[in-house]
Amino acid sequence: MICPDYIIEGLEVQFRSIEQQRMQGLPLLNPALQVEAVGFRQWQDLCLGVLITPWFMNLMLIPHEGDSWREKRIGDKQTHLFPSGPYDFILGEEEGIGRYQMCSLFSPMFEFSDQQTAVTTATQVMLAIMDEENQDGLSTCESEINRRWHGEAEEDETTTDESSEPERSVAISERLQQPVSRRDLLRGTIHQDGEQ
């Protein structure tokens, strides 16, 4: 079921305003991107989707009424269980939309060369979190997601082999052109040579 238009439009209007008023001039903005809500749908009486901005891509949970989670403090964390596993969200609040919860996927956004690549990634994320086959060890910790996305080892990150050649940084647009499962997209285990 699709979320009401007023929720999605309100979210986009509010974050465009944040971009213009609070974020102007900051070096972490990717000028190739714009604010866009992607894939929003009903989930347990909430609206769930991905919000793309020039400075982050987050999973967002928005209640139909802005007074939800009043017993919690801004910045509190809450874990939600999706078909693909548990995800940690942080409570936020904005005047135009009220309280919402967010789970960071990417920040900053310089790996995205254009809006379509960001939208494609967001769409794949929405498919992946609703797929039970993605339950095997997905992490929702931002540092873990980023580490896996860049192909870094899970164990003993302090050891380095000086004789090894440094890995070439691969753009997300290149990764998306390689055959990859939704599981690997969300886990960030897409390597430059297509190895999983």
Image (cartoon, rainbow, N blue to C red):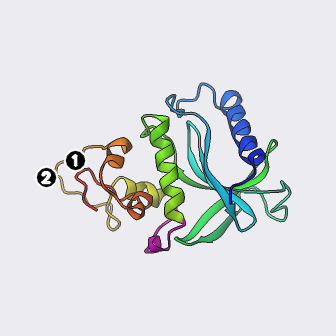
Q: Judge whether 181 appears above or below 11 on screen.
A: below
- Magenta range: 130-141
Q: Is residue 140 visible?
A: no
For the C terminus, the image quarter is bottom left
Q: Is any part of residue 62 visible from this angle?
A: yes
Drawn side of residue 51 relative to residue 175, left or right = right
Numbered label attached to residue 163: 2
**Which residue is at 64% across, 61% downward?**
89
Q: Is residue 133 magenta?
A: yes
Mark toward the viewer: 2 or 1:
1
Magenta part, dominant SS: loop
For the N terminus, the image quarter is bottom right
- For the point 61% across and 40% down, the residue is 36
- Mark 1 residue type: Pro
Q: Is residue 62 placed above or below 51 in the rendered structure?
A: below
Q: Which mark is residue 196?
A: none
